[in-house]
Amino acid sequence: MAVRIIGTGSSLPGNIVDNRALSRFVDTSDEWIRERTGIGERHISTGETVVSLSAEACERALENAGRDAGEVELLLVATCSPERNIPCAACQVQSRIGAGKAVAFDLNAACSGFLFALHTACAYVEAGMYANALVAGGEVLSKLVDWTDRGTCILFGDGAGAVYVEKADRGGILGYVQHSDGARGNVLTCDTRGLKNPYADFSLETAYIQMDGREVFSFAMRTVPAGILEVLEKTRIPKEDIDLFLLHQANQRIIDGIARRLNVDPGRFPSNVSRVGNMSSASIPVLLDELNRKGALKEGMKLALSGFGAGLTYGACVMEW
Ligand code: COA
């Protein structure tokens, strides 16, 4: 049995912040940011939340699929920047969109989160436990970013994307792989509030994203091609048969470098990072939705999706559209 994406949706905050605007409060320039990352602008929340963005993305995915929220059986939200510890974002989205029948929970694998959630939904549907799933990736990273740290605040953006999947007779997701390397997790972190109770006080200053950019860069360059080749081998699909490679949109230099390492025409690596920056778990589903809505995804096309990020985590899947 196959699991197929039937609809896609996305939602971005209305506030667009370009590099020049950032250079008013950190020592940076449009030229530096574009050259090192390919990013020109990003959407930054002025009140939109992981829940409001994810709910809108989910509603659009359902509309695109021609399905009703009441039919949804599983609702997963991948996020590393929820507004609340409890209840989870997925339960709040469930309530907003009226998916009363769905079981709903969150999944955090940072920038690999959407793919890991999609694979989780696939496993549930393949196992026969649920007939369909809504899978969203939503982030408001702007609240985790130190806006005085020019090394990180230039990279990230806010937004959400979602897909609706159903069991199908053919095509759909053909195979997936995922990996975690917790031993090297310290290169990209964001702490929570720390421990403070009547017996201990390890409370922390407000915690922000900390990153060793060069380590993360080399991690991506090593693991993303390896993950893609692994899933291609597993599914016995040659890379020449892949029409489009949809990577986590962290940095244009990483995307171009991976295309070179795989020896694949960079034209087969669509990108929106220049307009939206790195939206962690929202990156891949937003890109997928943009391509879907402009008619760039034709039935029968083969797509390779690949995510990587904090954890460290990485994964890939191959699907027939
Ligand atoms: N504007 C201007 N200068 C900046 C800057 C900015 N926004 N950010 C850093 N710099 C400076 C540094 O202070 C450093 O100055 P110095 O040489 O005087 O010390 C210099 O630029 C080089 O810094 P470095 O961090 O070594 O740059 P880099 O070439 O590694 O590029 C990143 C930095 C973050 C763009 C790059 O490492 C990267 O893209 N890494 C991957 C990050 C990522 O994708 N993370 C998320 C993964 S999910």
Image (cartoon, grey):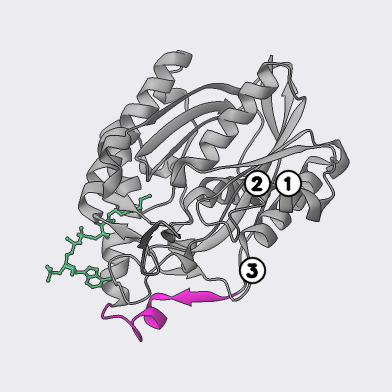
- Indicate whether 127 appears above or below 228: above
Q: Which residue is the site of mark 3? A: 48
Q: From the image, tell me which residue sits under label 1.
A: 61
**Mark 2–mark 1 distance (CA, rounded to whole Å):** 6 Å
Q: Say few, some or many: other residues with alpha carbon within 10 Å of mark 1 (under 14 / 14 to 19 / 20 or more).
A: many
Q: Identify the secondary structure beneath mark 2.
A: strand
Give the image quarter of residue 69.
top right
Q: Secondary structure at mark 1?
A: helix
- Quadrant of the image where one finds ligand 1: bottom left
Q: Earlier in the sequence, mark 2 or mark 3?
A: 3
Residues marked 2 and 3 touching at CB (< 8 Å): no
Q: At label 2, which amino acid type do we have?
A: Ala
Is 266 magenta? The answer is no
The magenta stretch is 15-28
Q: Residues within 10 Å of mark 3 (few under 14, many from 20)?
A: some
Q: Pinpoint residue 138: horizontal percent, then vertical percent.
A: 58, 53
Residue 19 lies in magenta, yes or no?
yes
Quarter in which the C terminus is drawn: top right
Choose the circle earlier in sequence order: 2 or 1: 1
Question: Can you name the residue that lies furthest to the front here?
Answer: 199
The residue that appears at 30% across and 52% down in the rendered structure is 253
Q: Is residue 263 left or right of residue 318?
A: left
Residue 134 lies, in percent from the top left, at 71, 39
Q: Give the mark nearer the N terminus: 3 vs 1.
A: 3
Residue 70, image quadrant: top right
Mark 2 and mark 1 residues within 8 Å of each other at the beta carbon: yes
Residue that carries the numbered disc 2 in the rendered image: 162
Quote the CA–CA distance across marks 3 and 1.
19 Å
SS at mark 3 in the image: loop
**Residue kind at label 3, given as amino acid type:** Glu
